[in-house]
């Protein structure tokens, strides 16, 4: 590269797929905005025009031919082996560096010997590793035995491919220490932790009065563990909870909901922000690789009650830590009574939380922090290759 190239390198950004705008897509948007000469490669694109404009930041977008398969939006997640071959067909010659944003496939791109590759890992694919048997057990219905056998064979082949993809990666970046430990176990490689960017500016601090209602939010799917939250509030009928969201489990969750819980359905973003700002506390029960919503709640100055396992163990400062200002309460998700005990603990200590300190902690996960860390990593890797 010449001097100009070093100042503004030509970057290939490779992302698994674009079904909707979630946490991984926010990372991609930040990376695209960082590099004016970036171009984006992805397997599937199902975004609308406005979503695409946000995620790509106006950079050119290259989509695999798999995205043109009839009705592929309904079954694209089952095309693992086809996707592994498709991602290898991306031609990245001519780019100064490659940055992949990967929870499964993007890190498997083929790069040149002198072409540095930085892989931002959201998570090793859980369905292929630690949750394989849960995934297979979920296959029910007609010919379930045959379908499980075929899925087992597919996942076996995918695991071999997945583990082989890390050999040519120069730098692995994990979105949390929780993921860093999983990367070490699955791939036998060390990774540097750079937490994903959170738009804390969209969640203004409320340092004033709050209502007497707790809030939780998310998609109603099993791993979000909303059942545990409902059970905890059933044990505390004197406390009130608003549940924001919807999803496949909604009918079952509503049926088991106690009278002190209100389901709001999906709300406009402005209303979600308002609920987080006024909440007594935000309650979370999922074991996430990172978990953006608990950080957004803290940006409002709202305390968070969350599991002591997963990303929330890194983003929530427990009340028992005397060395720092607390931002919430962590509980053991393996103990079925722990969440109720955490509510009891919060009720007896809710005046010990300082909204300004909670907000200040959330700002350590802001987008500029992410950009600075990633730019430093990419610059260092490019410099190492040029030497």
Image (cartoon, grey):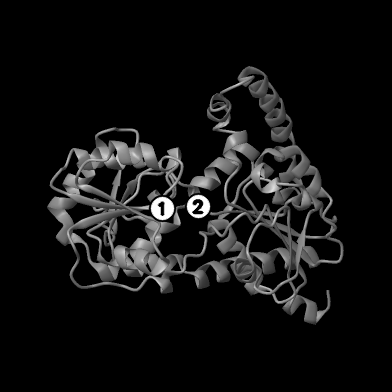
Q: Secondary structure at mark 1?
A: helix
Q: Residue furthest bottom?
A: 4
Left or right? Give the position of 73 relative to 203.
Answer: right
From where the camera sits, is residue 376 visible? no
Seen in the picture, residue 68 relative to 58 is either above or below; the reply is above
Lower sequence index among marks 2 and 1: 2
Q: 359 or 272, which is in the foreground?
A: 272
Q: Which residue is tagged 2?
A: 176
Q: Secondary structure at mark 2?
A: loop
From the top left corner, tell me how far across and down residue 18 is, in percent.
64, 56
Residue at 60%, 33% (x, y): give it.
Answer: 129
Quadrant of the rendering where the C terminus is positioned: bottom right
From the top left corner, tell me how far across and down residue 91 is, in percent.
85, 58
Tell me which corner region of the image, top left, top right, bottom left or bottom right, holds residue 331. Answer: top left
C-beta proximity under 8 Å, tags 2 and 1: yes
From where the camera sits, is residue 308 visible? yes
Label 2 crowd (10 A; few <14 / some 14-19 / many >=20)? many
State the CA–CA distance, disc 2 to disc 1. Answer: 8 Å
Residue at 35%, 62% (x, y): give it.
Answer: 297
From the top left corner, tell me how far across and down residue 48 is, in percent.
63, 64
Residue at 63%, 17% (x, y): give it.
Answer: 145
Seen in the picture, residue 153 relative to 28 is either above or below; the reply is above
Quadrant of the rendering where the N terminus is positioned: bottom right
Label 1 crowd (10 A; few <14 / some 14-19 / many >=20)? some
From the top left corner, tell me how far across and down residue 317 is, in percent.
32, 55
Tell me which corner region of the image, top left, top right, bottom left or bottom right, holds residue 287. Answer: top left
* Residue 330: assigned label: none
Left or right? Give the position of 185 relative to 272.
Answer: right
Left or right? Give the position of 29 relative to 113.
Answer: left
Q: Which residue is tagged 1?
A: 314
Seen in the picture, residue 268 relative to 214 is either above or below; the reply is below
Residue at 36%, 63% (x, y): give it.
Answer: 272
């Amino acid at each position: 590269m010449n001097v100009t190239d070093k100042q503004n390198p030509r970057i290939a950004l490779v992302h698994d797929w674009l079904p909707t705008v979630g946490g991984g897509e926010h990372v991609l948007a930040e990376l695209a905005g960082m590099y004016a000469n970036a171009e984006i490669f992805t397997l599937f694109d199902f975004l609308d025009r406005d979503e695409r404009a946000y995620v790509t930041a106006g950079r050119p977008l290259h989509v695999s031919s798999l995205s043109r398969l009839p009705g592929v939006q309904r079954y694209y997640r089952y095309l693992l082996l086809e996707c592994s071959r498709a991602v290898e067909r991306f031609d990245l010659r001519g780019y100064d560096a490659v940055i992949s944003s990967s929870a499964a496939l993007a890190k498997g791109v083929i790069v040149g010997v002198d072409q540095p590759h930085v892989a931002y890992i959201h998570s090793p694919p859980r369905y292929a590793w630690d949750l394989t048997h849960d995934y297979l057990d979920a296959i029910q219905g007609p010919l379930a035995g045959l379908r499980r056998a075929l899925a087992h064979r597919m996942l076996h082949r995918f695991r071999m491919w997945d583990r082989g993809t890390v050999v040519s990666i120069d730098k692995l970046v994990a979105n949390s220490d929780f993921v860093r430990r999983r990367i070490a176990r699955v791939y036998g490689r060390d990774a540097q932790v750079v937490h994903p960017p959170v738009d804390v500016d969209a969640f203004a601090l409320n340092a004033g009065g709050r209502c007497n209602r707790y809030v939780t939010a998310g998609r109603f799917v099993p791993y979000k563990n909303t059942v545990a939250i409902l059970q905890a509030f059933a044990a505390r009928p004197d406390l009130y909870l608003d549940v924001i969201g919807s999803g496949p489990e909604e009918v079952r969750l509503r049926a088991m909901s106690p009278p002190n819980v209100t389901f709001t359905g999906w709300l406009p973003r402005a209303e979600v922000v308002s609920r987080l700002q006024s909440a007594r506390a935000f309650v979370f029960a999922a074991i996430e690789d990172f978990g953006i919503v608990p950080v957004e709640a803290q940006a409002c100055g709202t305390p968070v009650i969350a599991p002591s396992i997963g990303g929330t163990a890194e983003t929530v400062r427990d009340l028992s830590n005397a060395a720092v200002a607390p931002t919430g309460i962590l509980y053991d998700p393996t103990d079925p009574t722990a969440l109720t005990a955490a509510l009891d603990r919060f009720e007896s200590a809710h005046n010990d939380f300082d909204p300004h300190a909670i907000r200040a902690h959330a700002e350590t996960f802001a987008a500029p922090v992410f950009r600075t860390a990633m730019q430093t990593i990419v610059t260092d890797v490019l410099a190492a290759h040029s030497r």
